[in-house]
């Protein structure tokens, strides 16, 4: 915290207009605290609201703009749906269904765990909730399959579960916080509303399916082991019939996914669809959430974090700091408008460097306010410039960049060395193969 404060104070001595210098100091202060996890994630967000308002860095409607972004309400809806899945027992049912279909070979088991994690990303919007749902089951199954603590089999199963439900989910709009932060800031700053279906078509074939395949293949290659010990017939008993609450929740989830996929037809933002689903789940008559859910189980810290980082991006844009960052970047990177492939790669590289320094949610906070200037400099469309961020924050170099990975590391007691090596390997696959393929796919779709 003292380091972040010192860096922030140092910026005030630069020859910048006062609002821009104050915003720069506040950006380093907040993102430094988020990146180092020196304090809970909500604390820098609340500090941002106070400091930006007290020193009048931007109008109040700009500072607090995160709260009226549809992305904020999509995130809220995801939290409530996650609570409903746990409360009704649907989450446990999904886990039991998974355990009975893992197969009898190690390769088949790793592949199915990865695909199950990817499937959950369409149902449960929160990556942290998916990891908390999957890991206890996978740890129990590893014990039953004879993979003891520290074995390759156990590590491979846990890595496949964590990365299978987290890494490919960047291609599904509501399934990760950085996606929603980018969406909210694009809407706030440029009036660009991301379509669920268009976002899926743009990213899922490469960053979803191919990345899931890469996760499974790398887990098999890096953590080879014998076939699992067969589970006895008693453990494979048929599940009990679904309760009325579970059936209603399945209906809500199906309706959400259907409306999200067809948002290009009805023009209703994914955030308002998520809020509508949350309202139904919170209705006492629905019996889909606990009676005191809104008071005791909603994670307001995460909500403040999302609202704070979206508002921080809006203040960066309003004070002109984003354009100043791009002007500084332009001294070292020469963009050529007649080479869209090279420009997209360069923008991805810049965002990737920011992701290493400020963690994943910091990428849209810094890059989105400068997107319009970058579009002018590169000759790319605004949407193409925004989408290069997804290529960057979906490709993680080290575990510290992503809070869900740190949570999984602690929860599953995974060896740090194993997760770090896997991150590095997956990052290399992303840089060498997936990023170029994704950009080539954009050419096919006409984005570039």
Image (spheres, rainbow, N blue to C red):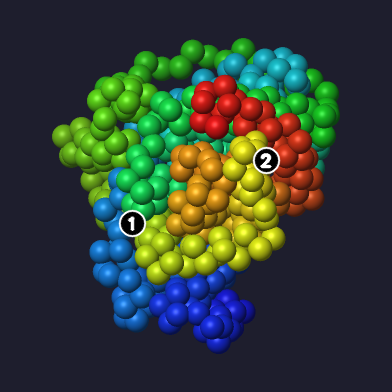
Tell me what residue is drawn at x 79 percent, y 20 percent.
227
Q: Tell me where residue 215 sits by quadrant.
A: top right
Q: Tell me where residue 223 sits by quadrant.
A: top right
Tell me what residue is drawn at x 62 percent, y 39 percent.
338
Relative side of 315 to 135, left or right: left
Relative side of 193 to 15, left or right: left
Q: Tell me where residue 243 sits by quadrant.
A: top left
Q: Position of residue 116 (x, y in %)?
A: 56, 25
Relative side of 425 to 120, left or right: right
Circles 2 and 1, Cβ within 8 Å, touching? The answer is no
Instruction: Tell me the element at label 1.
Output: helix
Q: Position of residue 110 (x, y in %)?
A: 70, 25
Q: CA–CA distance between discs 2 and 1?
A: 33 Å
Q: Position of residue 410 (x, y in %)?
A: 64, 52
Q: On the image, numbered disc 1 is attached to which residue?
A: 66
What label sits on residue 342 in the rendered view?
Answer: 2
What label sits on residue 55 in the rendered view?
Answer: none
The N terminus sits in image quarter = bottom right
Q: Is residue 53 visible?
A: yes
- Out of 365 and 327, give the one closest to the viewer: 327
- Out of 126 and 315, give the one closest to the viewer: 315
Give whichever of discs 2 and 1 has the lower sequence position: 1
Tell me what residue is drawn at x 52 percent, y 67 percent.
324
The C terminus sits in image quarter = top right
Image height of 262 relative to 57, above or below: above
Tell me what residue is drawn at x 32 percent, y 66 percent.
63
Residue at far front of view? 338
Instruction: Tell me the element at label 2.
Output: helix
Q: Is residue 230 visible?
A: no
Q: Position of residue 256 (x, y in %)?
A: 32, 28
The residue mark sitting in front, 2 or 1, is 2
Residue density around tag 2, few if under 14, some if 14–19, many if 20 or more, within 10 Å? some
């Amino acid at each position: 915290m003292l380091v972040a404060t010192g860096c922030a104070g140092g910026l005030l001595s630069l020859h910048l207009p006062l609002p821009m210098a104050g915003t720069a100091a506040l950006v380093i202060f907040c993102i430094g605290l988020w990146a180092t996890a020196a304090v809970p994630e909500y604390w820098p967000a609340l500090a941002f609201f106070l400091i930006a308002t007290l020193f009048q860095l931007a109008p109040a409607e700009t500072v607090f703009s995160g709260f009226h972004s549809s992305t904020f309400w999509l995130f809220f809806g995801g939290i409530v749906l996650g609570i409903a899945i746990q409360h009704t027992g649907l989450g446990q049912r999904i886990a039991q269904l998974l355990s009975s279909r893992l197969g009898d070979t190690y390769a088949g088991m790793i592949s199915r765990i990865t695909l199950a994690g990817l499937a959950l990303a369409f149902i449960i919007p929160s990556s942290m909730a998916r990891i908390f749902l999957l890991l206890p089951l996978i740890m129990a199954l590893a014990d039953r399959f004879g993979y003891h603590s520290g074995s390759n089999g156990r590590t491979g199963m846990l890595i496949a579960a964590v990365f299978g439900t987290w890494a490919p989910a960047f291609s599904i709009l509501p399934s990760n916080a950085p996606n929603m932060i980018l969406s909210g800031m694009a809407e706030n700053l440029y009036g660009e509303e991301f379509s669920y279906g268009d976002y899926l078509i743009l990213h899922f074939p490469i960053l979803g399916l191919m990345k899931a395949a890469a996760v499974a293949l790398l887990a098999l290659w890096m953590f080879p082991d014998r076939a699992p010990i067969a589970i006895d017939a008693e453990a494979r008993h048929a599940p009990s019939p679904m309760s009325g609450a579970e059936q209603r929740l399945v209906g809500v989830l199906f309706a959400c996914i259907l409306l999200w996929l067809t948002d290009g037809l009805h023009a209703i933002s994914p955030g308002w669809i998520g809020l509508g689903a949350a309202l139904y789940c919170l209705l006492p008559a629905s019996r889909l959430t606990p009676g005191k859910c809104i008071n005791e189980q909603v994670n307001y810290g995460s909500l403040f974090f999302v609202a704070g980082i979206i508002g921080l991006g809006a203040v960066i844009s309003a004070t002109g700091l984003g354009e100043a960052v791009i002007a500084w970047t332009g001294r070292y990177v020469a963009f050529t408008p007649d080479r869209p492939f090279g420009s997209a790669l360069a923008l991805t590289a810049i965002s990737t460097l920011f992701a290493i320094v400020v963690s994943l949610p910091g990428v849209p906070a810094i890059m989105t306010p400068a997107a319009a200037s970058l579009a002018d400099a590169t000759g790319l469309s605004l949407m193409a410039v925004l989408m290069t961020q997804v290529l960057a924050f979906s490709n993680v170099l080290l575990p510290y960049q992503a809070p869900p990975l740190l949570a999984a590391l602690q929860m599953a007691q995974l060896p740090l060395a194993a997760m770090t090596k896997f991150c590095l390997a997956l990052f290399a696959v992303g840089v060498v193969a997936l990023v170029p393929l994704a950009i080539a796919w954009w050419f096919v779709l006409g984005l570039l």
